[in-house]
Image: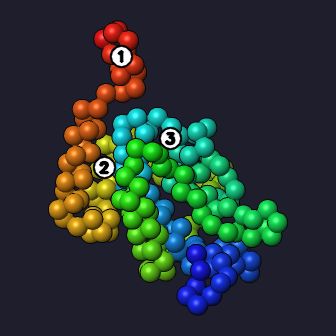
């Protein structure tokens, strides 16, 4: 995350309360604004959602924090300088199409950056944040309402992607049923 023509990390700004530059904050807010929809790309199977929730180091709500492994969007800090260096998107698994996933994540962040979005307060025990979708179907419902991400995909790809994922969401068997079938316990 560097400014054009600079070699310095543009993510950090120790003069700001968060320690994150205005550009970095806007990028993070773009991720948070589209997080529930992004899950349909980064957690694209029924079983992907088995590892999402409190105590799973992925988070259970649309939130961010610094060096907190229990939020889905984590700001990482350099141990030597104590400066914010980058943001970690923690809700991804190996079943995702990495090209589509990264395109959507970067598009969401860049949309936040382009529109200069203001970063919401950091996660705290006092604040109540929106819960993350608990299933692929819930995430797909969020995607259907996300005009920005749908426009990034375009009408043909968005229609096809949602149709394929909805079919999989309604026809994919759970891990327990898959194991039972493999063991002949159906």
User: In this rendering, would 51 be left or right of 2?
Assistant: left
- Measuring from the top left, give residue 21's x and y in whole percent: 63, 78
- Measuring from the top left, give residue 108's x and y in whole percent: 42, 67
Give the residue displayed 40% in from the left and 44% down from the top.
95
Q: What is the number of the mark on residue 182? A: 1
User: In this rendering, would 102 be left or right of 16?
Assistant: left
Sooner in the amino-acid sequence: mark 3 or mark 1: 3
Q: Secondary structure at mark 2?
A: helix
Give the residue displayed 44% in from the left and 39% down from the top.
49
Q: Secondary structure at mark 1?
A: helix
**Which one is nearer the viewer's eye here, 100 or 159?**
100
Which quarter of the figure has residue 12? bottom right
**Residue 46 can be seen in this image:** yes
Instruction: Check the image and tell me how it is coloured.
Output: rainbow
Q: Quadrant of the C terminus?
A: top left
Which quarter of the figure has residue 177? top left
- Measuring from the top left, give residue 29's x and y in whole percent: 51, 68
Cα–Cα gap, marks 2 and 1: 29 Å
Q: What is the number of the mark on residue 140? A: 2
User: In this rendering, would 71 be left or right of 169?
Assistant: right
Task: Say if 92 sits above or below 5 in the image.
Answer: above
Sooner in the amino-acid sequence: mark 2 or mark 1: 2
Q: Residues within 10 Å of mark 2 (few under 14, many from 20)?
A: many
**Which one is nearer the viewer's eye here, 20 or 86?**
86
**Which one is nearer the viewer's eye here, 1 or 110?**
1
Nearest-to-viewer mark from 3 and 1? 1
Give the residue displayed 36% in from the left and 45% down from the top.
44
Q: What is the number of the mark on residue 52? A: 3
Q: Residues within 10 Å of mark 1 (few under 14, many from 20)?
A: few
**Which one is nearer the viewer's eye here, 148 or 42?**
42
């Amino acid at each position: 995350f560097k400014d054009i023509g600079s070699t310095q990390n543009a993510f950090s700004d120790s003069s700001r309360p968060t320690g994150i530059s205005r550009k970095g904050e806007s990028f993070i807010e773009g991720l948070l604004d589209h997080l529930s929809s992004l899950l349909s790309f980064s957690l694209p199977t029924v079983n992907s959602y088995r590892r999402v929730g409190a105590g799973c180091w992925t988070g259970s709500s649309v939130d961010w924090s610094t060096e907190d492994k229990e939020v889905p969007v984590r700001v990482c800090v350099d141990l030597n300088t104590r400066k914010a260096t980058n943001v970690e998107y923690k809700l991804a698994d190996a079943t995702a199409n990495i090209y589509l996933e990264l395109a959507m994540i970067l598009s969401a962040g860049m949309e936040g950056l382009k529109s200069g979005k203001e970063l919401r307060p950091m996660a705290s025990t006092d604040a109540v944040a929106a819960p993350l979708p608990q299933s692929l179907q819930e995430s797909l419902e969020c995607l259907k309402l996300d005009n920005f991400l749908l426009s990034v995909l375009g009408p043909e790809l968005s229609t096809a992607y949602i149709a394929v994922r909805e079919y999989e969401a309604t026809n994919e068997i759970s891990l327990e049923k898959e194991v039972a079938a493999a063991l002949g316990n159906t």
